[in-house]
Amino acid sequence: MTAVDIIAKLFSGEGAQDYLGEEVSVAVHMRQAGALAEAAGAPDAQVAAALLHDVGHICGPVSGQQLMAGTDNRHGETGAAWLAQWFGEDVTEPVRLHVAAKRYLCAVVPRYYGKLSAASVHTLAIQGGPMNAEEAAEFETLPHASAAVAVRRWDEAAKNPGRDGPDFDHFRPLLQSLLRRHLAGLW
Ligand SMILES: [Fe+2]
């Protein structure tokens, strides 16, 4: 099975699970996020990061359900480590940092907290709450911080129960081209 087939299988299998109390499944949520990134004209790596940002909820040993129950499943780290088998840091770092980006945005953007869904407010507390000024300043120095913030904004907007988003197959060529670039050392 190719890498893209393995990811596709995750979307069609585990990805059909409820997404942490939202009205969409994990897979629909991620496909919507990928579509929003694409519609915004984002670079391919950011479209892939948006599409794959929550794989850590469904590929790792600690589930999203456990996060909702109060244990931080560190799904950013889990997802990034899994994706690093195939993709470069332009994809994996925004995935790893998308939870930190929520904590950052809640600290620095007035009213951002009010945009969070109820489930996301609940998990924010488990994930450490909004950053303090020192943490926010440190976050801004990270090389992929702005990409992580962009992914986070698409993440927040990708919980629309009235939409499915494009099929996973829509994203195959993009993922395939990123794999090739990564394996050829072209990052
Ligand atoms: Fe998400």
Image (cartoon, rainbow, N blue to C red):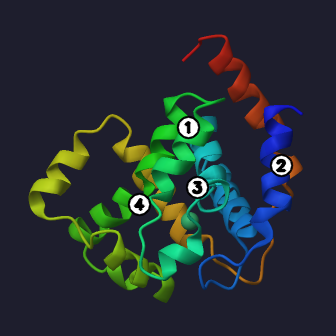
The residue located at (58%, 55%) in the rendering is 56
Tell me, yes or no, whether the two marked residues, 4 and 2, touch with CB atoms within 8 Å: no
Judge by depth and name the residue closer to the eye, 35 or 100: 100
Upstream in sequence: badge 1 or badge 2: 2
Q: CA distance from mark 3 to mark 2?
A: 14 Å
Rendered-image quarter of ligand 1: bottom right
Q: Quadrant of residue 157?
A: bottom right
Q: Which residue is mark 3?
A: 56
Vertical placement of residue 93 versus 86, above or below? below
Q: Quadrant of the C terminus?
A: top right
Q: Within 10 angstroms of label 3, few (less than 14), some, or many (20 or more) residues? A: many
Compare marks 1 and 3 and give the one earlier in the sequence: 3
**Disc 3, ligand 1: is the CB inside 8 Å?**
no
What residue would you read off at disc 2? 8
Q: What is the three-letter code of the residue carrying label 3?
A: Gly
- How crowded is the residue under tag 4: few (<14 C-alpha within 10 Å), some, or many (20+)? many
10 Å crowding of disc 1: few (<14), some (14-19), many (20+):
many
Q: Amino acid at mark 4?
A: Val
- CB of mark 1 within 8 Å of CB of mark 2? no
The structure residue drawn at horizontal position 42% and vertical position 79%, both measured from the top left corner, is 70
Question: Circle 1 sits on which residue?
Answer: 91
| Mark with earlier residue (1, 4) | 1
